[in-house]
């Protein structure tokens, strides 16, 4: 089943027209930032044809994500991103860093949401009504749209990092723990964008 507008419509009908979906990309990566996105969709009666394929970003090909990224930005009432770098992830821990990225994404919106739908996490610093939904990116269109924006933004960031750190192959694996990435870490040691607090990175650094 693709994600639906069921939760968004319930909030719209309750008078909350500015409903932000929130999701992140990069929590499990060994390198690079964690990126969150917030997307507020208009109060649609039904989804425009361009958005009917919106889904959890992990279920989409890179080409599908790129196409839908542009469609989401065209149709969104507002959208924003928040980026927390590796050094902050090491300092804070990944869950607080993810919450920080989500708060930054909300702060970067051009309007204040009246309600927030979040994939899995609760945000204690957010005062408006919120719902943390397990597998929210598979259930809610606005969260799925945010997952696409976060993933494409982060992939672009990692591809740009590849230009100045080509030895690590970031354009290919985007900082996740592939065999190629492990081999590069063993050979070259950590880069400035590696998460040194992550056990696989720490272990490989120690071996090196």
Image (cartoon, grey):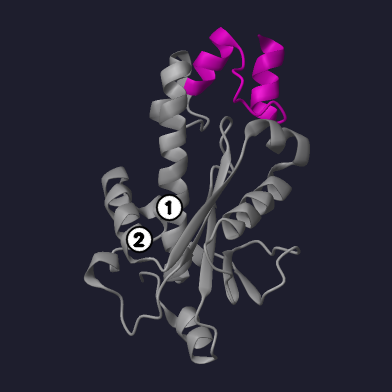
Magenta span dominant secondary structure = helix
Circle 2 packing at 10 Å, graded few (<14), some (14-19), many (20+), is many
How far across and down, in percent of the image, does residue 75 sit?
A: 33, 66
- Does residue 197 appear to the left or right of 175 in the view shown? right
Q: Secondary structure at mark 1?
A: helix
The residue depicted at 45 percent of the width and 64 percent of the height is 78
Provide the residue designation for mark 2: 72
Left or right? Give the position of 61 relative to 133.
left
Task: Provide residue 13's location: percent of width, then percent of height.
Answer: 49, 91
Q: Residue at x 66, y 9 (%)?
A: 208
Q: Which quadrant of the structure image shows residue 90? A: top right
Total labels: the figure holds: 2
Which of the image's four quarters has the N terminus? bottom left
Residue 14 is inside the magenta segment: no
What is the magenta range? 181-208
Q: Residues within 10 Å of mark 1 (few under 14, many from 20)?
A: many
Among all residues in the image, which is located at the extreme front? 110
Residue 97, quarter of picture:
top right
Mark 2 → mark 1, Cα distance in angstroms:
8 Å
* As drawn, 184 above or below 37: above
Work out whether residue 32 can be spotted. Answer: yes
The residue wearing badge 1 is: 149
Q: Residue at x 53, y 84 (%)?
A: 11
Left or right: residue 184 compared with residue 122 = left
The reply to whether dot 2 and dot 1 touch (C-beta < 8 Å) is yes
């Amino acid at each position: 089943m693709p994600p639906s507008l069921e939760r968004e419509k319930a909030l719209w009908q309750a008078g909350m027209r500015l409903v932000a979906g929130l999701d992140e990309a990069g929590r499990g990566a060994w390198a690079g930032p964690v990126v969150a996105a917030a997307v507020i969709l208009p109060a649609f009666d039904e989804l425009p044809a361009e958005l009917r394929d919106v889904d959890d970003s992990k279920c989409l090909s890179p080409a599908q994500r790129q196409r839908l990224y542009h469609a989401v930005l065209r149709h969104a009432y507002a959208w924003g991103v928040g980026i927390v770098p590796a050094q902050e992830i090491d300092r804070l821990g990944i869950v607080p860093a993810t919450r920080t990225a989500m708060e930054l994404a909300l702060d970067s919106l051009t309007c204040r949401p009246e309600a927030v739908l979040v994939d899995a996490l609760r945000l204690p610093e957010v005062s408006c009504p919120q719902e943390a939904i397990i597998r929210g990116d598979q259930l809610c269109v606005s969260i799925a749209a945010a997952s696409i924006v976060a993933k494409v933004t982060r992939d672009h960031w990692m591809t740009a990092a590849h230009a100045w750190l080509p030895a690590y192959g970031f354009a290919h694996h985007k900082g996740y723990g592939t065999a190629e990435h492990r081999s590069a870490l063993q050979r070259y040691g950590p880069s400035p964008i590696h998460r040194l607090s992550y056990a696989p990175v720490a272990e490989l650094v120690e071996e090196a």
